[in-house]
Image (cartoon, helix red, strand yellow):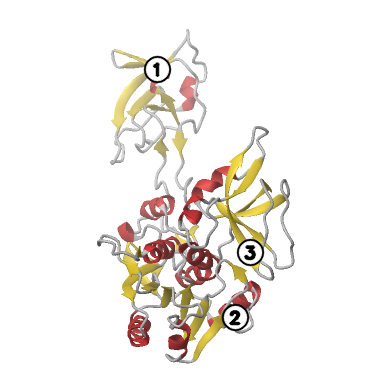
Amino acid sequence: MFRKLLTLAEAQKIIHQHVTPRPLNVEEIPLLRAFNRILAQDIVATLDIPPFDRSTVDGYAVNAEDTFNAEENKPAKLKICGRANVGEMPKATVKLGTAVEIVTGAPIPKGANAVVMLEDTELQDEELYVHNAAVAGENIMKTGSDIKKGETILTKGAVLRSGEIGTLAAAGSSKIRVYVVPRVAVLSTGPEVTRPGRKLPPGRIYDTNAYSLGAAVEESGGKPIHMGVLQDKASQIRNALTKALRSTDLIVTSGGVSVGPKDLMPQVLDSLGKPGVIIHGIAIKPGKPVTVASIDEKMVFSLPGHPASALLVFHLLVQPVIQTMTGRKPYDPIRVKALATMKMFPAKGRRTFIMVSLRRDKLKRLLAEPVPTGLSGAITTVAKADGFVEIAENQQFIDADEEVKVTLLKAAALGYVD
């Protein structure tokens, strides 16, 4: 039997005491490989962007004073004195009464302080007719108007996505210092578990957890290292965990943590190093038998074998640890308010998490509907859910039409955020 079950808050506090809240290390990588990595330095611009005044339209660079009296039926007449192209500084200079043809992105020639759009002009025999008056600065992007030299353009801890990588490229960076991605060992246990792709023998199931937990590791910013399926043999489990402790930064296992004769994971973990098992059983549903160990300053999370239970516990306990190791800023889950479509009952004495899907009724009210397949073993419970409702240990039930808070699990559910 389990010893006294910890509350979820107690378990999270114990984990925090054993986790060093900092990234693993820093490495320099090419910018082309930096997508979704975490920046390990502040980036200060070494030049103005753009580095010169540039045109934002196709048209003609002019001195605005030459166009002040221009009207549709009384255009200003200017003489073309050259052309400004992208990728080179213009040779022509704009003087009073002249204009330089210019394309979008080209540097503004000397003497010009505005650009008139092509559609506001008419060209006849090398003479330009401007039908609308221009003002100084019109259609010109000034030097440093996007980024100024010396400006901090990205700060340490930023997630490098398309916009950030584009900014770094614009600033001239070809390499960047980022935090090392933690390597997370993923192991499954149980004689009934078979790797997908093989023929499924009678009485067996496919290894759902290795794939779902591996994906969850990647979503959290880590790199999953799949180490296969282990039989319920203490020697095999010990050897695999010893190898994982040597070669990875954190370990996630599934199965073998309950109280049956084949549930060997807790005792094996306790034999591998100090302090050993720090959590064995949490007062939550689903996920009660979760076991957590700290072995020579490396964390091992042994999750229940049931797929939905394993994913929920990963979300509650493992994801924050991996995010800390990646250098990501603290994750604050998004919650929305909704109305329960039916009564929801917790397990007695345990904090209960009920998977729900979201929808809107005819009055546009947001409704939280429990996912029908509520058994912890059903992986489709999580696949169908937009989030979960949390019911405290001392709460008797949630009534139909009662307002609840739903913690979102997937990006698609953001469509329900007001």
- Give the camera-side residue of 325 and 31: 325
What residue would you read off at disc 1?
121
Residue at x 50% of width, y 46% of height: 412
Could you say which quadrant of the image residue 176 lies in? bottom left
Sequence order check, earlier mark of 1 and 3: 1
Circle 1 — which element? strand
Q: Badge 3 is on which residue?
A: 352
Q: CB under 8 Å between callouts 1 and 3?
A: no
Residue 169 picture location, percent across and down: 36, 53
Which amino acid does the dot numbered 2 rest on? Ile
Q: Which percent across, then down, holds residue 391?
A: 68, 61
Between circles 3 and 2, the one closer to the viewer is 3
Element type at marker 2? helix
Q: CA distance from mark 3 to mark 2?
A: 20 Å
Q: Which mark is residue 64?
A: none
Query: Which of the two residues, 321 or 353, is positioned nearer the viewer here?
Result: 353
Q: Position of residue 197 (x, y in %)?
A: 26, 60
Which quadrant is the N terminus positioned in? bottom right
Residue displayed at 68% across by 59% down = 345
Look at the picture and state if 174 lies above or below 413.
below
Q: As shown in the figure, which amino acid type bears the numbered disc 1? A: Thr
Place of residue 335 in the rendered image (x, y in percent of width and height, measured from the top left)? 62, 54
Q: Residues within 10 Å of mark 2 (few under 14, many from 20)?
A: some
Up/down of 66 relative to 297, above or below? above
Farthest residue, direction left = 198
Residue for badge 2: 14
- Residue 174 appears in the picture as rendered: no
Q: CA distance from mark 1 to mark 2?
A: 73 Å
Q: Residue at x 64, y 82 (%)?
A: 4
